[in-house]
Amino acid sequence: MTTDARILIYSALLAWLMLVVAALLRTGGLTPGRLGAAFGNRHHLPEQSPLAGRADRAARNMLENLVLFVTLLVAAHIGDAPQHQIDLGARIFFYARVAYVPVYLAGITHLRTAVWIVSLVGLGIIAAAAL
């Protein structure tokens, strides 16, 4: 398996984990006795906490960027781009996305943007390799 394929799998797992954490924070499922709300229809949820809101936005952002990541990986492979450049871009993207999660959850706005830009650099490397 190529490095970029492995990183794609890791990225999908990261996105899934982010979605689960966001859902648990939103439903209060991490609070003792509230796990049932996470498994229910979610008709009567408590007011969303700032942390739950940030977790939800971070997860949505990951999904948006994952679409770009997959698209660029496919284009790079179709275009027979150099594997070392694809791998470099994929690594930068993934590790920046891993760093993005705690920074976003902590609410550190300017650092969050800087980390997001680093992930875009990774996407840019893959795009440049594909072209």
Image: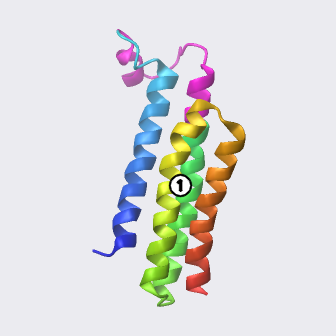
Q: Is residue 29 left or right of residue 64?
A: left
Q: Position of residue 24 (x, y in %)?
A: 44, 26
Within 10 Å of the Cα at label 1, are there few (<14), some (14-19), or many (20+) other Cα atoms? many
> Which residue does the image show at 67% across and 51% down from the upper left?
114
For the magenta stretch, what is the residue range? 33-56
Tell me if residue 25 is in the magenta stretch: no
Q: Is residue 16 above or below residue 77?
A: above
Asked if residue 98 is positioned above or below residue 127 in the image, the reply reads above
Coloration of the structure image? rainbow
Residue 119 in picture, x, y percent from top left:
58, 59
Q: Secondary structure at mark 1?
A: helix
- Report the residue that reaches farthest toward the right: 110
Question: Quick check: 36 left or right of 58?
Answer: left
The N terminus appears in which quarter of the rendering?
Answer: bottom left
Would you identify the image quadrant in which residue 121 lies?
A: bottom right
Residue furthest to the left:
1
Asked whether 4 or 63 is in front, the reply is: 4
State the count of labels. Answer: 1
Residue at the image point whose x is 42% and y is 83% from the top: 83
Q: Give 27 or 49, whichever is nearer the viewer.
A: 49
Which residue is situated farthest in the bottom direction here? 80
User: Residue 125 at what x, y percent from top left?
Assistant: 58, 75
Q: Is residue 4 left or right of residue 81?
A: left
- Give me the residue at 41% from left, 55% from top: 12
Mark 1 lies on residue: 96
Quarter of the image where the C terminus is located: bottom right
- Taking depth in this image into account, of 54 and 26 the one nearest to the observer is 54
Left or right, residue 114 beside residue 46: right
Front residue (pair 59, 125): 125
**Location of residue 72 with respect to 30 vertically, above or below:** below
The kind of residue on which mark 1 rests is: Ala
